[in-house]
Amino acid sequence: MTSRPYRLPLLALAVCLPAIAASEGVFAQTKPLNILVTNDDGFDSSGLKVMRTALIAAGHKVTVVAPATNVSSSSMSMTSGVLKIENKGDAVWAVYGTPADAVMIGLAHILRDTPQDLVISGTNAGQNIGASTNGSGTVSAALAAARYGVPAIATSAGLGQESANAYPVAAAIVNQMIAALDAGRAPGTKLLPDRFVINMNVPAVPASRMKGIKWAPLSERSAYTRVYSETGNPNEVRSRLTLANSVGSETDTDLSLFAQGYVTLTLLDGDLSVGAASSGAVISRLSKLALPQPAVVQ
């Protein structure tokens, strides 16, 4: 199967990120930035704590605004009405809502007087690649930030026995991304173009077995399969996710490269529209749609 091309050009980031490596010290230290960290696993998850610690160690001013509990697979869901927020101390806030709720409350309410340079969502426990990104709370939190005008990076680690070892690798690469993007931008501009989100996935393998870092388009396949089973109770089923066991014939998508042991980077923009080249035939078939005429009153 031929992989889908990127919808947005990679040139700008290719210049900024010419050779990201997993080791420290590749790029010069960036100046301190205001960074909001969120996720969908909860404010006290291991992946978020590792990311926060690494960003603070790099000199950045970090504020955590994340869900109070694990709300994975909540996509871009947002809550209307009353939401409880709780200050956990030391610039950490828990939001009793979704990941998108958390990032928006962080940007538009908690930090409304302190503009943020960047939002980091993650590191999530479980890869968010291919079609799975559509349901990901981690990725959707980053997309919500980008739509609000703040550059964002979503970062996830694969599931497996080595998943905890992927967290510091993800944090180290993110720090290198920040330094490279900051060094490569023109004065007064943002770290990323408007609406751009970088989606990074780190495989759950020992660091010595990671093959490298590659840009890749999203796979049309999902990283997971949702399975429904009977619970034994009337009118009730159990829903759970299982890892997909095949990448099909793909060779260069994020799903296939991740399965080979590469850290994958993909540019997203959150645009759900279909490109003009693909949509023309459908639009043509529906070109004679018209508003219904009002009924004639006798």
Image (cartoon, grey):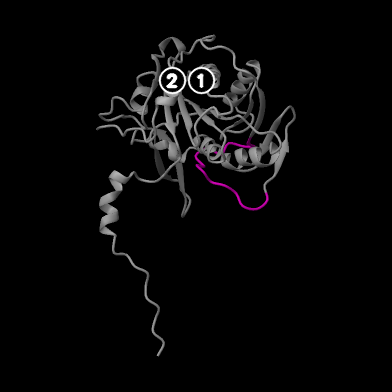
Magenta region's main secondary structure?
loop
Residue 285 lies in what quarter of the image? bottom left
**Amino acid carrying mark 2 in the image:** Val
Q: Circles 1 and 2: CB distance less than 8 Å?
A: yes
- Residue 169 at x, y percent in the picture: 51, 16
Q: Is residue 158 visible in this depiction of the protein?
A: no
Q: Residue reaching furthest bottom?
A: 298
Q: Which residue is at a point 59% across and 26% down the rendered structure image?
A: 48
The residue segment tinted magenta is 66-82
Rendered image: mark on residue 223: none
Relative height, residue 166 to residue 104 (above, below): above
Count neighbours of disc 1 (C-alpha within 10 A) and say few if under 14, some if 14 to 19, many if 20 or more: some
From the top left corner, tell me how far across and down residue 218 is, in percent: 37, 32
Magenta span has 70? Answer: yes
- What residue sits right under mark 2 in the picture? 15
Q: Is residue 30 above or below residue 95?
A: above
Image quarter of the C terminus: bottom left
